[in-house]
Image (spheres, rainbow, N blue to C red):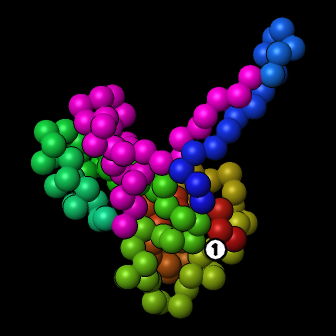
């Protein structure tokens, strides 16, 4: 893929305008600016939450573990999951998805409780990430 592209549009006077669009970004040019921490999270989806916190702290940008965790999922590839190295291997994944699909109006907290009552132990984060999979 190219680093730049063209955006062509017609303005309100009917004249065609062309603008250059950058598809790549060097986050080092934006250290200290609002949104830099979010750019770092987006550019480093391969790093763990702890590693992202270390990187942010090294540049003097303090963020909480929950801040990084809540934003990291925005940039993950579909189906990647939060920790593919440690999948849940209890064989109840399909059953959990069926239960969640049958109850689309329940909150994450309610779904977690419903799964627990069915003998399926899943945390709120897992339910949040997988509630639309089924």
Residue visible at 25% across and 56% down in the picture: 52
For the residue pair 49 and 127, the one nearer the viewer reads as 49
Quarter of the image holding residue 98?
bottom right
Q: Is residue 30 left or right of residue 102?
A: left
Q: Quadrant of the N terminus?
A: bottom right
Q: Residue at x 16, y 55 (%)?
A: 54
Residue 50: say if magenta.
Answer: no
Q: Is residue 111 above or below residue 57?
A: below
Q: Quarter of the image holding residue 31?
A: top left
Crowd class of label 1 (few under 14; some 14 to 19; many from 20; radius 10 Å) = some
Q: Position of residue 87 (x, y in %)?
A: 43, 82
Q: Is residue 68 visible?
A: yes
Q: How many marks?
A: 1
In percent of width and height, residue 10 lies at 81, 21
Q: Nearer the viewer, residue 110 or 125?
A: 125
Look at mark 1 in the image and give the residue it sits on.
97
The relative height of residue 17 versus residue 101 in the rendered view (above or below) is above
Q: Is residue 55 left or right of residue 74?
A: left
Res. 113 in view: no
Location of residue 83 in the rendering, given as x and y in whole percent from the top left corner: 39, 73
Q: Quadrant of the C terminus?
A: bottom right
**Residue positioned 49% across, 61% down in the render:** 76
Asked whether residue 37 is drawn in magenta, I would say yes
Q: Is residue 51 left or right of residue 113?
A: left
Task: Please determine whether, in this image, residue 115 is positioned above or below residue 31.
Answer: below
Pick the front one: 65 or 13? 13
Of 83 and 38, which appears nearest the observer?
Answer: 38
Question: Which residue is the extreme one toward the top?
Answer: 13
The residue segment tinted magenta is: 17-46
């Amino acid at each position: 893929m190219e680093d730049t592209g063209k955006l062509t549009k017609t303005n309100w006077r009917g004249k065609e305008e062309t603008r250059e669009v950058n598809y790549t970004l060097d986050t080092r040019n934006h250290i200290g600016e609002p949104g830099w921490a979010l750019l770092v999270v987006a550019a480093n989806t391969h790093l763990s939450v702890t590693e992202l916190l270390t990187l942010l702290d090294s540049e003097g940008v303090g963020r909480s573990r929950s801040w990084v965790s809540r934003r990291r999922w925005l940039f993950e590839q579909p189906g990647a999951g939060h920790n593919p190295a440690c999948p849940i291997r209890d064989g109840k994944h399909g059953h959990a998805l069926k239960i969640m699909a049958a109850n689309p109006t329940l909150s994450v907290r309610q779904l977690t409780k419903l799964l627990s009552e069915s003998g399926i132990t899943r945390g709120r984060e897992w339910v949040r990430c997988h509630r639309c999979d089924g």
